[in-house]
Amino acid sequence: MVIVGELINSTRRDVAGAIARRDGAFLKDLARRQAEAGADIIDVNVAVADGDEVENLKWLVNLLQGAVDIPLCLDSPNPAALKAGLSLCGQRAMINSITAESHRWDEILPLIQQYKPRVLALCMDDGGVPETVEDRLRIAAKLVDGLVGAGVSGDDVFIDPLVKPICINTGYGMTALKATRAVKVAFPGVKTICGLSNISYGLPGRRLLNRAFMVMCVAAGMDAFILDPLDRPTMSLLDASLALAGRDEYCMNYIAAARAGKIEF
Amino acid sequence: MVIVGELINSTRRDVAGAIARRDGAFLKDLARRQAEAGADIIDVNVAVADGDEVENLKWLVNLLQGAVDIPLCLDSPNPAALKAGLSLCGQRAMINSITAESHRWDEILPLIQQYKPRVLALCMDDGGVPETVEDRLRIAAKLVDGLVGAGVSGDDVFIDPLVKPICINTGYGMTALKATRAVKVAFPGVKTICGLSNISYGLPGRRLLNRAFMVMCVAAGMDAFILDPLDRPTMSLLDASLALAGRDEYCMNYIAAARAGKIEF
């Protein structure tokens, strides 16, 4: 299981403020605490902070590389920001994200070929976000074939089936789960990833829904999540789910977490 | 989703004590509170209480029928106790359980034919509890064919895939989930059911594991659980899981539960 820590995101007011006033101590602490809590990769999004995105991202990448020794996930709609970030990353980064939309593909693929990051690839194309499992699988095939054909190792490809809110269509949860299983079957060499908050958009008790959906995703074979690793109930449920899904040999990780007092619920 | 409230079970010390001293108020209250919390059926097990099981069960069935207007699930290894209980049930009962073991089948089938209860049918035969999904499906076929052949409506058959502890084999969780899906595909007219505590036997943090496994079971299509309906986090997770699995039209039940302040986590 690969955990991408989501907290350094400029849509969070405290993070945007810290970026704007160059509060390095706050941001380094947020990165370190996520790493200590189990994050394997730290997502870095400065897209909606005040100031120039490229300058903000360069500052933040340099800052965080000195603070944690795990990779960064550069998360931006702006190819110039991604390029600037990639050029500074000592450790091989991840980028969030490429899609099968023509313009996005053409802008991002050269960066992938130059810097060889891990790649989060969203199942959407010029037709937008697909409705069905079959459409997701068709777009996933386009992404996997295109990336692997361009020299990317399948192991570095993280396919995001794109989770849509169940308040719009109650079938969207099962669609994402089935798409995850279908991608794992069709492309056993690539990974699957998703965020957890879209599923519950527009509904009350969102944390509960997000956590329950994570459990279902683990049983469906999801390889990675973008989540808040400081949320102990979420991390406890994740450890429990991996044990239940046969993805924790002898339940050793779960038992160790329980012995260390890390299981909270 | 059918919820069988599990609390009136003589393996619980307070329940065994209440049965032995004929504390009807305590037991009626326990039945009523489970019904109010969402139980559709009340499990009644007196097997390990002091005194004669048949007499205890007759007393308890008469007592509870006056207290709640939902069916009872008569839960006993003893065919004489089941027969005595069935003969007293005004509402059509459930029995827990029949198996494909020859002696059990021969003892229980006549009671089913006479009293026409709902039937909890365990996927085990003379070879014991099976190891694989395929063996579970083979035994489920024997149970479904035998019961339906004997005149039982498929809708009254609840197949229990038999969940074994993941501390013995980490694959047992996925085996139960796959067996559940396989039974639903092979016999769309029958229901699936399971208890939640076996999965976590021998491990720390059992409630967490039980709850996470319930979530996975909902996504796999499980139709019924034997559980503690007074456990609010479990019931909240169940409501959330049904919404996520597309089993709650417009998420109406989940939203209503949240509005009523019943979502707790």
Image (tube, coloured by chain):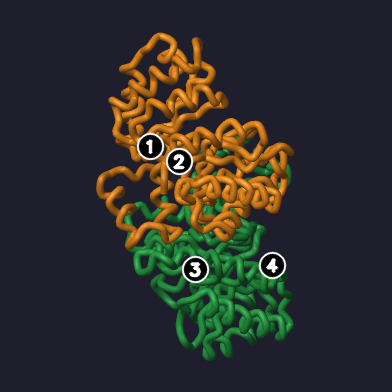
Chain colours: A orange, B green
Residue in the picture at 63% in, 81% down? B141
The residue to which callout 3 is attached is: B175
In the rendered image, residue B259, in percent from the top left (x then y), is placed at 63, 33
Letter of the chain that mark 2 sits on in the rendering: A
Mark 3 nearby-residue class (10 Å; few <14, some 14–19, many ≥20) = many
Looking at the image, tell me whether mark 2 or mark 1 is earlier in sequence order.
1
C-alpha gap between disc 4 and disc 2: 61 Å
Residue in the picture at 55% in, 44% down? B236
Letter of the chain that mark 4 sits on in the rendering: B
Residue A249 in view: yes
Say which quarter of the image contains residue A25.
top left
C-alpha gap between disc 2 and disc 1: 8 Å
Disc 1 + disc 3, Cβ < 8 Å: no
Q: Secondary structure at mark 4?
A: loop
In the rendered image, residue B2, in percent from the top left (x then y), is placed at 63, 59
Q: Nearer the viewer, mark 3 or mark 4?
A: 3
Q: Please determine if labels 2 and 3 lie on a single subunit.
A: no
